[in-house]
Amino acid sequence: MHELSIAARVVEEAGRIAAAAGGRPTRVTLRIGALAGVHEPSLRAAYGMLREGTPLADAELAVEAVPLRVWCGACRTEHDVAGPVRLACPACGRPTGEIRAGRELDIESITLEDAPAAPPLPPHATRSPP
Ligand SMILES: [Zn+2]
């Protein structure tokens, strides 16, 4: 149960971060790389189970998928590739083993309920739409 141990680590780390920030978390956003080998439905199920009784009990899980990105030394460029089956530069076709992104499994952000209010604006200023 790979996803169970990942979810346990997320609950523990996010709980610690939220406690340090002093707010009740409403969302935890993860960045998960294409090569991280995470089965998202299993991770969500494990998270839903493990968050009970923790500071994350009401925090939803959001996932940002990170594509597999490689570096080609011949083109001197990074490229996203569709999958790890054929690790080659999509521009010039040279094989590459230099993976630049895709293994991520990070807590990207934690949204807290008690976020500080935006500072007041001068009388003539308006807020831009979200
Ligand atoms: Zn290339």
Image: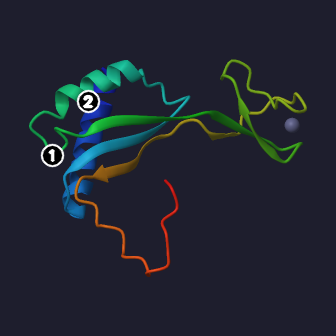
Quarter of the figure that contains the N terminus: top left
How many other residues sit within 10 Å of disc 2, few (<14), some (14-19) or many (≥20)? many
The reply, left or right, for residue 114 in relation to residue 84 is left
Sequence-wise, the earlier of marks 2 and 1 is 2
> Image height check: is 123 above or below 22?
below
Query: Which residue type carries mark 2?
Result: Tyr
Task: Answer with the quadrant where ligand 1 appears in the image.
Answer: top right
Residue drawn at point x = 38 percent, y = 36 percent: 62
> Image height check: is 115 above or below 66?
below
Observer-nearest of 83 and 61:
61
Location of residue 77 (image quadrant): top right
Q: Read off the residue under disc 2.
A: 47
Residue drawn at point x = 19 percent, y = 42 percent: 56
Q: Read off the residue under disc 1.
A: 55
Secondary structure found at label 1: loop
Q: Is mark 1 within 8 Å of ligand 1?
A: no
Percent position (x, y) of residue 109?
39, 50
Residue drawn at point x = 77 percent, y = 33 percent: 96
> Image height check: is 94 above or below 27?
above
Numbered mark located on residue 78 in the image: none
How many other residues sit within 10 Å of disc 1, few (<14), some (14-19) or many (≥20)? some
Location of residue 53 (image quadrant): top left
Percent position (x, y) of residue 18?
24, 55
Gap in angstroms between the C-alphas marked 2 and 1? 13 Å
